[in-house]
Amino acid sequence: MTAHQPIIRPVFTPETLERIAALYPLQAGLLHHHLPDHPLLSLEALAQLGEGMPASEVEYNPGNVPIGIRPEDVPSNGLSIGETIRGIESNGSWAVLKNIENAEAYRVLLMDLLGELKPVVEPRTGAMLTPQGFIFISSPGSITPFHFDPEHNILLQLKGQKVMNVWPAGDERFAHRREHERYHTGGHRNLPWEDSYREGAQQVPLGPCDAVLMPVMAPHFVANGDAPSISLSITWRSEWSYRESEAHAANAALRRVGLDPAMPPRWPSYAWVKTVGWRIVRRLKLVS
Ligand SMILES: [Fe+2]
Protein backbone atom coordinates (compact mmCIF):
# COMPACT_ATOMS: atom_id res chain seq x y z
CA MET A 1 0.00 0.00 0.00
CA THR A 2 1.27 3.44 -0.90
CA ALA A 3 2.16 5.62 2.08
CA HIS A 4 -0.24 8.38 3.03
CA GLN A 5 0.36 11.60 1.12
CA PRO A 6 -0.49 14.68 3.17
CA ILE A 7 -2.89 17.12 1.52
CA ILE A 8 -1.19 20.49 1.65
CA ARG A 9 -4.05 22.84 0.90
CA PRO A 10 -7.75 22.85 1.72
CA VAL A 11 -9.63 20.60 -0.70
CA PHE A 12 -12.81 22.62 -0.14
CA THR A 13 -12.44 26.43 -0.37
CA PRO A 14 -14.35 28.81 1.93
CA GLU A 15 -16.66 29.54 -1.03
CA THR A 16 -17.45 25.85 -1.40
CA LEU A 17 -18.10 25.50 2.33
CA GLU A 18 -20.54 28.43 2.07
CA ARG A 19 -22.27 26.68 -0.81
CA ILE A 20 -22.56 23.49 1.24
CA ALA A 21 -23.96 25.52 4.14
CA ALA A 22 -26.70 26.85 1.83
CA LEU A 23 -27.63 23.40 0.44
CA TYR A 24 -27.08 20.93 3.27
CA PRO A 25 -28.78 18.66 4.22
CA LEU A 26 -31.80 18.78 1.87
CA GLN A 27 -30.61 20.07 -1.53
CA ALA A 28 -28.36 18.58 -4.20
CA GLY A 29 -25.94 20.89 -5.95
CA LEU A 30 -22.68 21.42 -7.79
CA LEU A 31 -19.54 21.99 -5.72
CA HIS A 32 -15.83 22.18 -6.47
CA HIS A 33 -12.79 20.50 -4.94
CA HIS A 34 -9.02 20.80 -5.06
CA LEU A 35 -8.02 17.22 -4.36
CA PRO A 36 -4.81 16.90 -6.37
CA ASP A 37 -3.69 13.80 -8.27
CA HIS A 38 -3.18 11.32 -5.47
CA PRO A 39 -1.14 8.10 -5.67
CA LEU A 40 -3.84 6.22 -3.72
CA LEU A 41 -6.32 7.02 -6.50
CA SER A 42 -4.38 5.85 -9.57
CA LEU A 43 -5.92 2.97 -11.54
CA GLU A 44 -3.13 0.59 -10.46
CA ALA A 45 -3.52 1.53 -6.77
CA LEU A 46 -7.28 1.04 -7.04
CA ALA A 47 -6.85 -2.32 -8.80
CA GLN A 48 -4.63 -3.48 -5.94
CA LEU A 49 -7.06 -2.11 -3.36
CA GLY A 50 -9.94 -3.99 -5.01
CA GLU A 51 -7.95 -7.23 -5.21
CA GLY A 52 -7.30 -7.04 -1.46
CA MET A 53 -10.95 -6.46 -0.53
CA PRO A 54 -13.45 -9.12 0.48
CA ALA A 55 -16.00 -9.91 -2.25
CA SER A 56 -18.74 -8.27 -0.19
CA GLU A 57 -17.02 -4.86 -0.50
CA VAL A 58 -16.59 -5.00 -4.26
CA GLU A 59 -19.35 -4.70 -6.86
CA TYR A 60 -18.82 -4.61 -10.63
CA ASN A 61 -20.69 -5.41 -13.81
CA PRO A 62 -21.05 -4.39 -17.47
CA GLY A 63 -21.58 -0.65 -17.80
CA ASN A 64 -24.25 -0.71 -20.51
CA VAL A 65 -27.14 -1.61 -18.23
CA PRO A 66 -30.48 0.24 -18.57
CA ILE A 67 -31.31 3.15 -16.24
CA GLY A 68 -33.92 0.99 -14.54
CA ILE A 69 -32.88 -2.57 -13.70
CA ARG A 70 -33.71 -5.09 -10.99
CA PRO A 71 -30.59 -6.14 -9.06
CA GLU A 72 -31.16 -9.81 -9.96
CA ASP A 73 -31.04 -8.88 -13.67
CA VAL A 74 -27.59 -7.22 -13.55
CA PRO A 75 -25.22 -9.48 -15.54
CA SER A 76 -21.57 -10.33 -14.78
CA ASN A 77 -18.78 -8.87 -16.92
CA GLY A 78 -16.83 -12.14 -16.67
CA LEU A 79 -13.68 -10.45 -15.33
CA SER A 80 -11.91 -10.18 -11.96
CA ILE A 81 -12.04 -6.84 -10.14
CA GLY A 82 -8.35 -6.26 -10.96
CA GLU A 83 -8.95 -6.91 -14.66
CA THR A 84 -12.05 -4.70 -14.57
CA ILE A 85 -10.18 -1.71 -13.14
CA ARG A 86 -6.93 -2.07 -15.13
CA GLY A 87 -8.87 -2.38 -18.40
CA ILE A 88 -11.60 0.15 -17.60
CA GLU A 89 -10.77 2.25 -20.66
CA SER A 90 -12.00 -0.43 -23.04
CA ASN A 91 -13.84 -3.25 -21.22
CA GLY A 92 -17.24 -1.54 -20.92
CA SER A 93 -17.57 -1.96 -17.14
CA TRP A 94 -18.67 -0.24 -13.95
CA ALA A 95 -17.16 -0.93 -10.51
CA VAL A 96 -17.41 0.34 -6.95
CA LEU A 97 -15.00 -0.28 -4.07
CA LYS A 98 -16.92 0.04 -0.81
CA ASN A 99 -15.82 1.01 2.68
CA ILE A 100 -12.34 2.06 1.61
CA GLU A 101 -11.85 3.34 5.17
CA ASN A 102 -11.04 -0.25 6.13
CA ALA A 103 -7.62 0.31 4.47
CA GLU A 104 -5.60 2.58 6.75
CA ALA A 105 -4.16 4.94 4.11
CA TYR A 106 -7.61 5.48 2.59
CA ARG A 107 -9.13 6.01 6.03
CA VAL A 108 -6.63 8.83 6.66
CA LEU A 109 -7.54 10.42 3.31
CA LEU A 110 -11.27 10.11 4.03
CA MET A 111 -10.98 11.58 7.53
CA ASP A 112 -8.85 14.49 6.23
CA LEU A 113 -11.59 15.37 3.76
CA LEU A 114 -14.49 14.93 6.18
CA GLY A 115 -12.59 17.00 8.76
CA GLU A 116 -12.79 20.02 6.43
CA LEU A 117 -16.59 19.69 6.34
CA LYS A 118 -17.19 19.43 10.09
CA PRO A 119 -17.65 23.18 10.75
CA VAL A 120 -20.47 23.26 8.19
CA VAL A 121 -22.08 19.87 8.80
CA GLU A 122 -22.15 19.53 12.57
CA PRO A 123 -24.13 22.73 13.35
CA ARG A 124 -26.83 21.47 10.98
CA THR A 125 -27.13 17.72 11.55
CA GLY A 126 -25.00 17.07 14.63
CA ALA A 127 -22.04 14.73 14.95
CA MET A 128 -20.72 13.17 11.73
CA LEU A 129 -21.31 9.48 12.33
CA THR A 130 -20.13 6.37 10.45
CA PRO A 131 -17.62 7.82 7.98
CA GLN A 132 -17.51 5.69 4.81
CA GLY A 133 -15.75 6.10 1.48
CA PHE A 134 -16.65 4.62 -1.91
CA ILE A 135 -14.66 4.77 -5.16
CA PHE A 136 -16.42 4.40 -8.51
CA ILE A 137 -14.47 3.37 -11.62
CA SER A 138 -16.42 3.28 -14.86
CA SER A 139 -15.93 2.91 -18.61
CA PRO A 140 -16.94 5.42 -21.28
CA GLY A 141 -20.72 5.54 -21.70
CA SER A 142 -21.55 3.43 -18.64
CA ILE A 143 -24.67 3.91 -16.53
CA THR A 144 -25.24 3.66 -12.78
CA PRO A 145 -28.92 2.63 -12.58
CA PHE A 146 -31.64 4.64 -10.81
CA HIS A 147 -31.33 4.15 -7.03
CA PHE A 148 -31.03 5.90 -3.67
CA ASP A 149 -28.51 5.72 -0.79
CA PRO A 150 -28.84 6.26 2.97
CA GLU A 151 -25.74 8.43 3.50
CA HIS A 152 -25.02 12.14 3.39
CA ASN A 153 -22.65 12.19 0.44
CA ILE A 154 -20.26 14.43 -1.44
CA LEU A 155 -19.03 12.81 -4.66
CA LEU A 156 -15.72 14.19 -5.92
CA GLN A 157 -15.10 13.74 -9.64
CA LEU A 158 -11.42 12.89 -10.17
CA LYS A 159 -11.06 11.71 -13.80
CA GLY A 160 -13.40 11.89 -16.78
CA GLN A 161 -16.88 13.39 -16.95
CA LYS A 162 -20.28 12.22 -15.85
CA VAL A 163 -23.74 13.69 -15.38
CA MET A 164 -25.47 13.18 -12.07
CA ASN A 165 -29.25 13.10 -12.61
CA VAL A 166 -30.93 13.63 -9.24
CA TRP A 167 -34.49 13.99 -7.98
CA PRO A 168 -35.73 15.54 -4.73
CA ALA A 169 -35.52 13.23 -1.74
CA GLY A 170 -38.91 12.51 -0.25
CA ASP A 171 -40.88 13.27 -3.45
CA GLU A 172 -43.10 10.23 -3.87
CA ARG A 173 -43.53 10.82 -7.60
CA PHE A 174 -40.03 9.36 -8.01
CA ALA A 175 -39.65 7.02 -5.04
CA HIS A 176 -42.88 5.98 -3.35
CA ARG A 177 -43.00 5.58 0.42
CA ARG A 178 -43.25 1.81 -0.09
CA GLU A 179 -39.83 1.90 -1.82
CA HIS A 180 -38.34 3.66 1.20
CA GLU A 181 -39.96 1.12 3.50
CA ARG A 182 -38.68 -1.76 1.36
CA TYR A 183 -35.14 -0.35 1.38
CA HIS A 184 -35.05 0.31 5.12
CA THR A 185 -36.17 -3.24 5.88
CA GLY A 186 -33.29 -4.83 3.98
CA GLY A 187 -34.20 -4.23 0.31
CA HIS A 188 -31.83 -3.34 -2.56
CA ARG A 189 -30.99 0.29 -3.43
CA ASN A 190 -32.28 0.13 -7.04
CA LEU A 191 -35.61 1.83 -7.74
CA PRO A 192 -38.34 1.31 -10.37
CA TRP A 193 -37.76 3.67 -13.31
CA GLU A 194 -40.15 5.47 -15.68
CA ASP A 195 -38.92 7.50 -18.68
CA SER A 196 -41.35 10.27 -17.67
CA TYR A 197 -39.15 10.95 -14.61
CA ARG A 198 -36.55 12.60 -16.86
CA GLU A 199 -38.55 15.85 -16.93
CA GLY A 200 -38.17 16.31 -13.19
CA ALA A 201 -34.42 15.71 -13.07
CA GLN A 202 -31.84 18.11 -11.70
CA GLN A 203 -28.81 17.52 -13.93
CA VAL A 204 -25.37 18.17 -12.46
CA PRO A 205 -22.56 17.78 -15.04
CA LEU A 206 -19.28 16.84 -13.40
CA GLY A 207 -15.67 17.04 -14.59
CA PRO A 208 -12.35 16.87 -12.73
CA CYS A 209 -12.33 19.29 -9.74
CA ASP A 210 -16.16 19.26 -9.63
CA ALA A 211 -18.16 17.59 -6.87
CA VAL A 212 -21.84 17.16 -6.06
CA LEU A 213 -23.65 17.25 -2.75
CA MET A 214 -26.14 14.36 -2.58
CA PRO A 215 -28.90 14.42 0.04
CA VAL A 216 -29.85 11.28 1.98
CA MET A 217 -32.23 9.07 -0.10
CA ALA A 218 -32.34 11.40 -3.12
CA PRO A 219 -33.09 9.17 -6.14
CA HIS A 220 -30.41 9.40 -8.83
CA PHE A 221 -28.77 7.77 -11.82
CA VAL A 222 -25.38 8.54 -13.31
CA ALA A 223 -24.37 8.67 -16.97
CA ASN A 224 -20.67 8.55 -17.82
CA GLY A 225 -19.11 10.70 -20.53
CA ASP A 226 -16.87 9.37 -23.30
CA ALA A 227 -13.75 8.84 -21.16
CA PRO A 228 -13.04 6.48 -18.23
CA SER A 229 -14.21 7.96 -14.94
CA ILE A 230 -12.95 7.80 -11.36
CA SER A 231 -15.06 9.32 -8.56
CA LEU A 232 -14.60 9.35 -4.79
CA SER A 233 -17.66 9.49 -2.54
CA ILE A 234 -17.07 10.70 1.01
CA THR A 235 -20.08 9.92 3.17
CA TRP A 236 -21.32 10.17 6.72
CA ARG A 237 -24.50 9.51 8.68
CA SER A 238 -26.28 11.70 11.20
CA GLU A 239 -28.61 10.96 14.07
CA TRP A 240 -31.30 12.50 11.82
CA SER A 241 -30.56 10.09 8.93
CA TYR A 242 -30.76 7.11 11.28
CA ARG A 243 -34.06 8.40 12.69
CA GLU A 244 -35.51 8.82 9.22
CA SER A 245 -34.46 5.26 8.38
CA GLU A 246 -36.15 3.96 11.52
CA ALA A 247 -39.29 5.95 10.74
CA HIS A 248 -39.58 4.18 7.37
CA ALA A 249 -38.95 0.81 9.03
CA ALA A 250 -41.68 1.66 11.54
CA ASN A 251 -44.03 2.47 8.68
CA ALA A 252 -43.24 -0.88 7.05
CA ALA A 253 -44.30 -2.60 10.27
CA LEU A 254 -47.54 -0.59 10.37
CA ARG A 255 -48.21 -1.46 6.73
CA ARG A 256 -47.82 -5.16 7.53
CA VAL A 257 -50.70 -4.89 10.01
CA GLY A 258 -52.97 -3.27 7.41
CA LEU A 259 -52.39 0.46 7.90
CA ASP A 260 -51.24 2.93 5.24
CA PRO A 261 -48.88 5.29 7.10
CA ALA A 262 -47.95 8.61 5.47
CA MET A 263 -44.50 9.45 4.16
CA PRO A 264 -42.48 10.85 7.09
CA PRO A 265 -41.73 14.53 6.37
CA ARG A 266 -38.03 15.15 5.94
CA TRP A 267 -37.75 17.07 9.15
CA PRO A 268 -35.68 15.94 12.12
CA SER A 269 -38.19 16.62 14.89
CA TYR A 270 -40.90 14.64 13.14
CA ALA A 271 -38.58 11.71 12.45
CA TRP A 272 -37.58 11.78 16.12
CA VAL A 273 -41.21 11.46 17.26
CA LYS A 274 -41.78 8.57 14.88
CA THR A 275 -38.63 6.81 16.03
CA VAL A 276 -39.50 7.10 19.69
CA GLY A 277 -42.90 5.63 18.85
CA TRP A 278 -41.20 2.80 16.98
CA ARG A 279 -38.94 2.03 19.95
CA ILE A 280 -41.96 1.94 22.24
CA VAL A 281 -43.77 -0.39 19.85
CA ARG A 282 -40.77 -2.72 19.81
CA ARG A 283 -40.39 -2.61 23.58
CA LEU A 284 -44.03 -3.58 23.98
CA LYS A 285 -43.39 -6.39 21.47
CA LEU A 286 -46.33 -5.32 19.33
CA VAL A 287 -44.30 -6.19 16.23
CA SER A 288 -41.52 -8.69 15.58
FE1 LIG B 1 -25.63 6.42 -5.45
Image: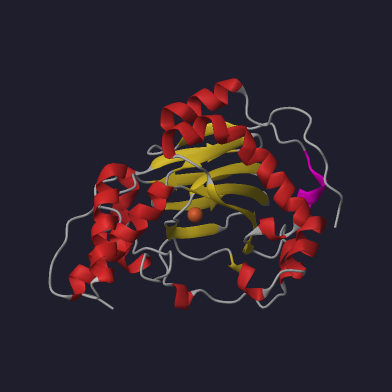
Query: Where in the figure is residue 106, as x and y percent of width and height?
Result: 73, 52
| Residue, far left | 259
- What colouring style does the render use? secondary structure
Residue depicted at x 32% and y 68%: 182
Residue 86 showing in the rendered view: no
| Residue, far top | 15
Residue 41 inside the magenta-drawn segment: yes
- Horizontal side of residue 9 vs 144, given as left or right: right
Residue 137 inside the magenta-drawn segment: no
Query: Where in the figure is residue 13, as x and y percent of width and height?
Result: 62, 24
Q: Is residue 222 above or below residue 31?
A: below
- Horizontal side of residue 5 vs 146, given as left or right: right
Q: Is residue 14 above or below residue 241?
A: above
Query: Where in the figure is residue 163, as x and y percent of width and height?
Result: 51, 44
The residue closer to the viewer here, 146 or 90, is 146
Query: Where in the figure is residue 120, as x and y percent of width and height?
Result: 51, 30
What residue span does the magenta drawing correspond to? 37-42
Residue depicted at x 49% and y 26%: 19
Q: Is residue 15 above or below residue 43?
A: above
Q: Can you say which quadrant of the picture contains the C terminus?
A: bottom left
Residue depicted at x 19% and y 70%: 255
- Horizontal side of residue 161 vs 6, given as left or right: left
Residue depicted at x 36% and y 46%: 167
Q: Is residue 74 above or below residue 230?
A: below
